[in-house]
Amino acid sequence: MISQKMLKLGQQSSVIRAISEYGNKRKKEIGAENVYDFSLGNPSIPAPEVIGDTLKELLDTMPPCALHGYTSSAGSMEAREAIAAHIRARFGAPADGAHIYMTCGAAASLTISLHALLNEGEEVVVPAPFFPEYRVFVEKAGGKLVPVPCHQPSFQLNLEAMAEAITEKTKVVLLNSPNNPTGAVYTRESLEALAELLKKKEGEYGTEIFLLTDEPYRELYYGEGLLPWLPSVYDRTVVGYSYSKSLSLPGERIGYIFVSPTCPDAELVFAAVCGAGRSLGFVCAPSMWQHLVTRVQGVTSDVEEYRGNMQILAGALSEMGYVVTPPEGAFYLFVKALEEDAAAFCERAKKYELLLVPSDSFGVPGFVRIAYCVSRETIEKSLPAFRKLMEEYKK
Ligand code: PLP
């Protein structure tokens, strides 16, 4: 008999995918311009021009066997050193290529890291709401996901609740800031307080607790300055990064894992990352894209388009009476559903061709996620539909 666990996973499509597939069907029926599809977090702005130029240059100048051949399992040392140099320059923090593992995007960064860190039955504490695939990744690695609701409506960390949830079984605290689905950015103060809490809990239980930080949205930040570099806040940190959103390259599958050299036993943690990558078959991330990122460190897509979308949509929805959490990053708006059952609300929204994602699979009921990484025209044309939806509930 085949694996029933995997069969179940393969047969249950994610809620987000199901809505997006409905959207594709609807677009064929009534025309794409008449469907307001806010389901997927697929970047709507093109990769910066330098990406195409660099790619052409690589194709023109690199011997094909070098460009397309295997790199070492952890990735090309040139790419890893370039990333480390960028981290040192940007954050003033220690970094070296020997502690970086190239991956196929954030999903692989997470699955590899979780397999490297977890033993059977150990717990992963995650602030809720969270990216739904976390549950799949944690359970596949033998762990147990322990969601801890954030404060509402700010969706900032609830440190008292986290303190209660962290036990001797906790091995990892998994953070994602800027956050999918809320767009919240955890404050430096709360991250520093969390670091203190983890140290205290480690002392109390005589255990090791890792901070695993999932950072595909690091560059999509609308505030001033830099977001805190978590390895400078807490030593036992592993960073999972991805270029999917920051360079609008989600289909190319490129990212990395950074084990902080400040992490106690960093060599052993990195060796476990290499072992996990090997056991999962995630070795030698796409070679051409490793060569590309080597040459474009510090380049990011222009997030102004997203900021504009967010301001128009958040402003208009608030004015209509929707309760909107003002996002500070990523490209999602988290909005209170107009009835308790968010899935029922999303069904009603479909009447107006609005495709929204109910929050239940993100671990929090009663909200919807609106992925505003769409054209400005879609944002503007969708506003009357949002208004009609609100009017229906007011009746
Ligand atoms: N983590 C979060 C929070 C995400 O939102 C996503 C994708 O949307 C991923 C991980 C996976 O990213 P990638 O496409 O780089 O694997």
Image: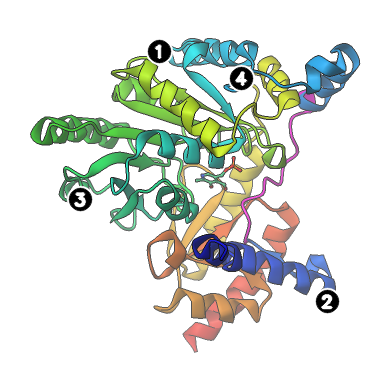
Q: Mark 3 sits on what residue?
A: 165
Q: Is mark 1 within 8 Å of ligand 1?
A: no
Q: Amino acid at mark 3?
A: Ala
Camera-side mark, 4 or 1: 1
**Gap between marks 4 and 1, in whole Å?**
16 Å
Give the quadrant of ligand 1: top right
Nearest to the observer: residue 247 or residue 214:
214
Task: Please give the name of the residue rendered at 67% of the width and 59% of the height, measured from the top-left corner.
Answer: 379
Q: Mark 2 sits on what residue?
A: 29
In the rendered structure, which disc, 2 or 1, sits on the residue that comes first in sequence? 2
Tags 3 and 1 in contact by the CB under 8 Å rule? no
In the rendered structure, which disc, 4 or 2, sits on the residue that comes first in sequence? 2
Magenta residue span: 39-50
Q: Amino acid at mark 1?
A: Ala
**Gap between marks 3 and 2, in whole Å?**
48 Å
Q: Mark 1 sits on what residue?
A: 93
Q: Amino acid at mark 4?
A: Gly
Q: Where is residue 227, by image quadrant?
A: top left
Q: Residues within 10 Å of mark 1 (few under 14, many from 20)?
A: some
Side of 117 relative to 49 (left or right): left
Determine whether 228 is above or below 388 in the image.
above
Q: Amino acid at mark 2?
A: Glu
Determine whether 86 is above or below 128 in the image.
above
Can you tell which mark lies on residue 350? none
- Mark 2 lies on a secondary structure that is helix
Q: Is mark 2 within 8 Å of ligand 1?
A: no
In the rendered structure, which disc, 3 or 2, sits on the residue that comes first in sequence? 2
| Residue 292 part of the magenta segment | no
In the rendered structure, which disc, 4 or 1, sits on the residue that comes first in sequence? 1
In the rendered image, residue 261, in percent from the top left (x then y), is placed at 38, 14
